[in-house]
Image (cartoon, rainbow, N blue to C red):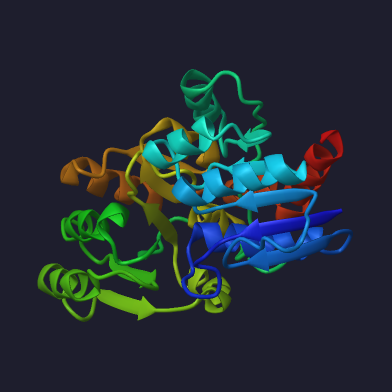
Amino acid sequence: MKIAIINKYQGKVNRGAETFVNELSKRLSKKHEVDVLNEINLFKRYDVIIPTNGRLQVFLVRILTWITKSKMIVSGQSGIGLDDRLNLYAFPNYFIPLTNYAKKWADKINPFVRKVVIPNGVDLQKFTFKGVTLKGGRTILAVGAFTKDKRHDLTIKAISKLSGVKLIIAGGGGDLKQQIYDLGLECLGEDRFKIIQTTQDKMPEIYKKADLFVYPTVAWESFGIAMVEAMATNLPVVATDDPIRREIVGNAGLFVDPTDTEAYAKAIEKALNTNWGDKPRKQAEKFSWDKIAEQYEKLFSTL
């Protein structure tokens, strides 16, 4: 089978969508001919095309697949909002919600498009078991671009309410790095705060530096691959209290409204003082990229 995955940012930035493309293409290419493209290729026929950038791209691919009688699959990496509305209005052969909650939303937007839930995942061989997380550790890790939606400022403010707790923020791009750094120094000081500008290949070891992972993202974010990477390292998670994060984290963490600084601080303190055993790792094992690639292959066979 000839498969094209289109992402104009592949190789240029490193976000969840780029991880999705990299991990899925790597596994599918073992059995299929897979091309990862930065732009639409009009000169080669594919059996399946997976556009990831939405908007104009998805409508152009839809026209192309009608002409060439190939199939279009759209994975809901954009999350609940305008971009995935447009993806659904483009009438793909299949739309892939990343969670059951996202599927319910998508069913309301366009009930005429076929859908199957396939989440994002984690490489369980790369992100390895740190060991049983015992209460008492005091290092917090947050991961994400230095952007408004990742809400690192809320984590800094919450941890400033706690004594003896250190914070590491690891991220790549984003235009708020200096602002976040200045806030961290102001609220926590150099001894309790560190920013790491990093790349994906260094993340497995960075997770092992922490005792707890926090993820105060906006409620409309589609998934949060960093959460399952952290859980694969056996880190418990304190995450935004919304249906998507609850579905992903399960019993491997706590949930809170991170805009409530006092409640967020108390949730972090409670998580640090809880023996989680191997619950995080067991939860992460539900999201193996190997199993996810098999689900995509099964879907392709129905087309």
Q: Position of residue 279 (x, y in %)?
A: 60, 46
Residue plotted at (39% across, 63% down): 144
Residue 133 visible here? no
Rendered position, 178 above or below 132: below
Q: Position of residue 187 (x, y in %)?
A: 12, 67
Residue 185 in which image quadrant: bottom left
**Does residue 42 appear to the left or right of 163 in the view shown?**
right
In the rendered image of this protein, does residue 218 appear above or below residue 210? above
Where is residue 130 shown, x and y percent of the image?
Answer: 60, 66
Number of numbered discs visible in the structure rendering: 0
Measuring from the top left, give residue 21's x and y in whole percent: 63, 60
Lateral position of residue 253 relative to residue 266, left or right: right
- Image quarter of the C terminus: top right
Q: Is residue 135 above or below residue 113?
A: below
- Name which residue lies at 40% across and 44% down: 221
Residue ID at (22%, 59%)? 159
Along the line of sight, the residue nearer the viewer: 51 or 147: 51
Question: Would residue 52 be visible to someone looking at this image?
Answer: yes
Quick one: 91 or 240, which is closer to the camera?
91
